[in-house]
Structures are given as C-alpha cells and as structure tokens.
Image (cartoon, helix red, strand yellow):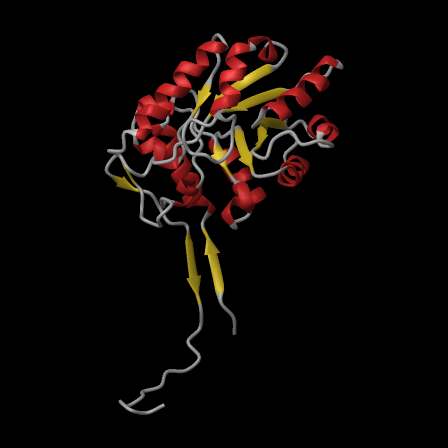
Amino acid sequence: MQGILNISLKDIKSNWLALNDASNGNASAVIKANAYGIGMVEVAKTLIEAGCNYFYVANLNEGIQLRKKIKSKEIRIAVFEGFFKGSEEAYIKYKLNPIINNLEQLIRLKKLVTQGYKIKTILNIDTGMNRLGLSQNEIILLLQNKDLLKFVEWEFIMSHLANAHDFKNRTNIKQLNKILQFSKIIPNIKLSLANSGGIMLGSEFCLDQTRPGIGLYGIDNFGNNIQLNSKSLKFPISLHAPVIQIREVNIGEK
C-alpha cells in the first residue's frame, strides 16, 4: 500500500507549446532545481520533442548532468550561477553557456577567450529585481569601458522581471526600458526578459526569448492556474494515496 505521484509529460508539452505560441515562437524552458522537482532530464527530452532547443539550469552540476543525457550541439544549455573560478574546463568540455552575472566573471571569461577558446555567453544585468546580474554601478562602469564586451560572442542580454505577476505595476515597463536602453551597447544583440509571468504581460515583453519555468506546470508563482488566450493551462501532477481507515469521532472525544 503506497502513494502514487502521476506526472503527465503530455500536459507539460502542451503547456510549453501554448507558452511558446504566446512568446512568438521564442520560448526556452527553465528546468532548474531538477525541473522544480519533476525530473529535469525527462522534462527536457519531452520539450525537445515539442521543439524547444534552449534550456536554463541553476548550476554547473545540473548543466553537466543534462548535457550527458542530451548531446546534440543544437540544444543550448545555459547556467544561471555563472562563470566561477575553476569551472572553465567544464563549460568547454560539456558545451555549456555561462551567464555572466558580474564584472569578475566577465574578466575571467575574457582570459579564457584570449587563450583561443570560443564560448557562447549570456550577459545578465539587474534591472530591478536585486537577485542576479550586473549591479547599477557595474553597468555604469561597463558603459564607460565598452571594450570589455568586444571579445565575447554574446548570445543574449538577459534580465529578470521582479513584478511580472502584477500587470499594473509600473516597474515592469521601467525594467523593459532599462534592458532596451542597455542593449544599444551591443549592436543587433538578442534580448531575454520575460519569465512565465512576463509572457502574460504581452508580446512587447517577449522580445527575442522568453524563459518560462513554473509556467510549464500550468501555474504561476502563487500556485494559481495560468489563463492564456482564454484557455487554462494544465496542471500535470496528481497525487493518489490509499485511505487506510475512516473513523467517526463524537464531540468531546479524543
């Protein structure tokens, strides 16, 4: 006698397809923390079948684990934690894309590239969430030293919305304008800003790539069902457990 957790990969695929459609066909998939506990490799393989070719994971270990199972060079795997000292060899060996979160990581990457290595990279700037990404002081310094950016093959500039769940919050527009303004530093660079909630804000926030994570499971970060284009996304998980015994207890009894 045991409980059973059912996970519908079919529903996860259906949700990604809906999110991708709302993203103008430019959705990636955030499968950090073992795909929120659902199973990173299984979810990734399912979404590849659906057409997803870009994945985000939390750390280098997750990136290595995923690359060992998915060897295609066409499938990109980006790592949120960035370019730590001692990680250089692993990024090259497993063909992972580092996300540069500060100037220290940028300088470390420059040393690697000047040694002749080519590595596609994402530049993360903090536009208002105060989590990961170049700080405002680092951004100002970078704007004054643009040559620091010329040696790298940049794939995206990214940032993360702090209030995407709140449609009326003016911070969303401010963050959008900040990443658009900063992007002028690198001609023709692609941009990624919208998480699951950001997709709901409309196409102007979708830019060149969206990064749905929790939305893959049909819910927002408050656990509410996502309504997209008048349709409900699907919650792909159900838990079943046997009832061992039912007792009727009168008032006052222990």
Q: Is residue 73 visible?
A: no
Vertical comparison of 37 with 216: above or below: below
Give left or right: position of 251 versus 110: left
Q: Is residue 209 above or below residue 144?
A: below
Considering only vertical position in the picture, is 61 above or below 107? below
Point 54% across, 34% down: residue: 56
Number of numbered callouts drawn: 0
Q: Measured from the top left, where is residue 26 in percent x and y?
A: 43, 24
Compared to residue 198, the image places residue 140 above or below, namely above
User: Which of these two is toward me, 147 or 124?
Assistant: 147
Left or right of 52 on screen, residue 200: left
Q: Quadrant of residue 12?
A: top left
Q: Nearer the viewer, residue 53 or 133?
A: 133
Q: Position of residue 60 (x, y in %)?
A: 65, 37
**Residue at 50% over, 47% down:** 36
Give how far across and how far down residue 55 sits, in percent.
53, 32
